[in-house]
């Protein structure tokens, strides 16, 4: 499960238009110097963004983060941005948050026996500052990462069915 979370987060960075963020974060993620995760359910409710000084403030809950590490984790999270003009619809997409940032709080989760005894954390986000350079892309990013996410899911299921293949 932890591999799935790490690799899925990496795929979001690979598929993102934000090359600077990808180049900044990728070395630590690839060398496992830093943990990364997406919510286990990628259709989870998005964090809400409010205009702030020099950026946005994010609030909400992110459920089921399986790769949360005590020394920090990069979180790939869904975000709903407010409309640019009153009366218009807002937009949704994906951003990167660091668990060490002010307003980001990791909370212990519940043991999930059906997911190989994973104990995913919950993340409470309370007015965490978010800069535009942490934006990964709009909602199309979910579709762009789908082939890798599906392949990882098949691999994970086969390892659960035959754990002796790990030896």
Image (spheres, helix red, strand yellow):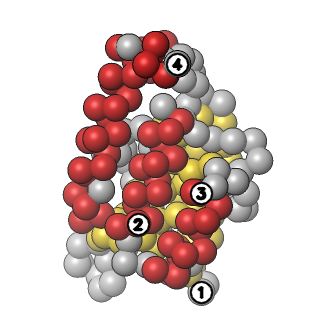
Compared with residue 160, is residue 147 higher up or lower down, i.e. above or below?
Answer: below
Q: Position of residue 167 (x, y in %)?
A: 52, 19
Residue depicted at 58% across the width and 61% down the height: 97
Q: Which sits earlier in the primary sequence, circle 4 or circle 1?
A: 1
How busy is the neighbourhood of tag 4: few (under 14 within 10 Å), some, or many (20 plus)?
Answer: few
Asked whether residue 104 appears in the rendered view, the answer is no
Q: Which of the pair 167/46 is nearer the observer? A: 167
Residue 157 location, quadrant: top left
Q: Are marks 3 and 2 in contact (CB under 8 Å)?
A: no
Task: Measure how far apart labels 1 and 3 are at the Cα level.
Answer: 28 Å
Asked whether residue 151 appears in the rendered view, the answer is yes
Q: Which sits earlier in the primary sequence, circle 1 or circle 3?
A: 3
Q: Which of the pair 28/16 is nearer the observer? A: 28
Task: Measure how far apart labels 3 and 2 are at the Cα level.
Answer: 12 Å
SS state under label 3: helix
* Label annotation for residue 167: 4
From the viewer's perspective, tell me whether residue 149 is left or right of residue 88: right
* Label annotation for residue 54: 1
């Amino acid at each position: 499960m932890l591999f799935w979370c790490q690799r899925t987060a990496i795929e979001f960075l690979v598929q993102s238009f934000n090359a600077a963020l990808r180049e900044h974060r990728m070395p630590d993620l690839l060398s496992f110097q830093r943990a990364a995760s997406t919510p286990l359910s990628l259709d989870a409710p998005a964090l809400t963004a409010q205009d702030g000084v020099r950026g946005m403030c994010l609030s909400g809950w992110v459920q089921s983060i399986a790769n949360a590490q005590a020394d920090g984790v990069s979180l790939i999270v869904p975000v709903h941005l407010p409309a640019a003009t009153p009366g218009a619809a807002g937009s949704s997409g994906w951003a990167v948050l660091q668990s060490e940032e002010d307003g980001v709080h990791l909370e212990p989760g519940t043991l999930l026996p059906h997911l190989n005894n994973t104990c995913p954390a919950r993340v409470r986000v309370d007015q965490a500052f978010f800069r535009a350079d942490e934006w990964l892309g709009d909602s199309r990013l979910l579709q762009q990462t789908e082939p890798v996410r599906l392949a990882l899911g098949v691999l994970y299921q086969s390892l659960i069915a035959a754990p002796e293949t790990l030896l």
